[in-house]
Amino acid sequence: MDRGIDLVAGGKSKKSKRAAPKSDNVYLKLFVKLYRFLVRRTGSKFNAVILKRLFMSKTNKPPLSLSRLIKFTKGKEDKIAVVIGCITDDTRVYEVPTLKVTALRFTKGARARITNAGGECLTFDQLAFRAPLGQNTVLLRGPKNMREAVKHFGKAPGVPHSHTKPYVRSKGRKFEKARGRRNRRGFKKARFAIDMWHGNDGIAKAESGANKIYFGFGIAPPASRI
């Protein structure tokens, strides 16, 4: 007799993407309600992208710094920059052009610098009035992989060709300084030992195990070196 598995009514979920935000923020839910309406009534691809990004998790809505915002809107200052995330201040920037920016949130410093330069900090309901179809806008995103956690993803730290950051308790002589040098410290990395000596003929010997390779300048190596 075949045995089945108990499923919630409706069967297995075939769609894994979000259909609503997990957040309980009432303002975010109002923006979602507004853009659901705009997507349904306008069919605009811009509005569909906005709605999809409003659903995303916090790690997928990374902040965008003021310096990157200025860089990406260079030559497009007349358009409205749209960021589904937070705009943060950057003290390395001295001159801020006049910008119109729509974002979920602005830090206190970023908002002050944008408004003091004659710009505007807009909300998404204000954007819906000004550009219901996304006309005259620039859609931007923050760098998603700049999180500290992402540096630890990938091949094991110390493995050949790995650039992964290790989870080390501290940095010093006793902490993960010998990986790849010997087997009892994770693994032993095969490497060529280059033995150089100076002579009249300028010969260099590369040695790996029992194999010996001689590099010269058209002159045979001395017998004592073979």
Image: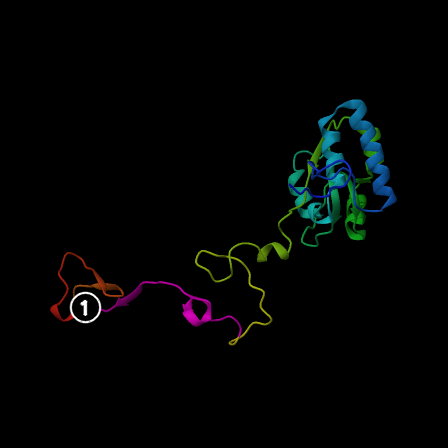
Residue 8 percent across, percent down from the top left: 76, 41
Please identify the quadrant where the C terminus is shown. bottom left
Q: Crowdedness of circle 1 by 10 Å Cα count: few (<14), some, many (20+)?
A: few
Residue most extreme to the bottom: 174
Is residue 122 rendered to the left or right of residue 164?
right
Residue 150 percent across, percent down from the top left: 61, 54
The residue under the point 69% across, 45% down is 60
Check the image and report above or below for 146 versus 204.
above
Count the labels in the image: 1
Is residue 6 rendered to the left or right of residue 223?
right
Read off the magenta span. 175-199
Asked if residue 189 is among those painted magenta in the image, a careful observer would answer yes
The residue under the point 15% across, 56% down is 218
Front residue of this view, candidates 209 and 46:
209
Front residue of this view, candidates 195 and 67:
195
Check the image and report above or below for 57 versus 194.
above
Is residue 225 rendered to the left or right of residue 150?
left
Badge 1 amino acid: Gly
Q: Secondary structure at mark 1?
A: loop
User: Badge 1 is on which residue?
Assistant: 199
Front residue of this view, candidates 82 and 153:
153
Residue most extreme to the front: 1
Check the image and report above or below for 127 versus 22.
above
The image quarter containing residue 224 is bottom left
The residue under the point 18% across, 57% down is 217
The image quarter containing residue 18 is top right
Residue 103 percent across, percent down from the top left: 77, 41
Please identify the quadrant where the N terminus is shown. top right
Residue 212 percent across, percent down from the top left: 22, 63
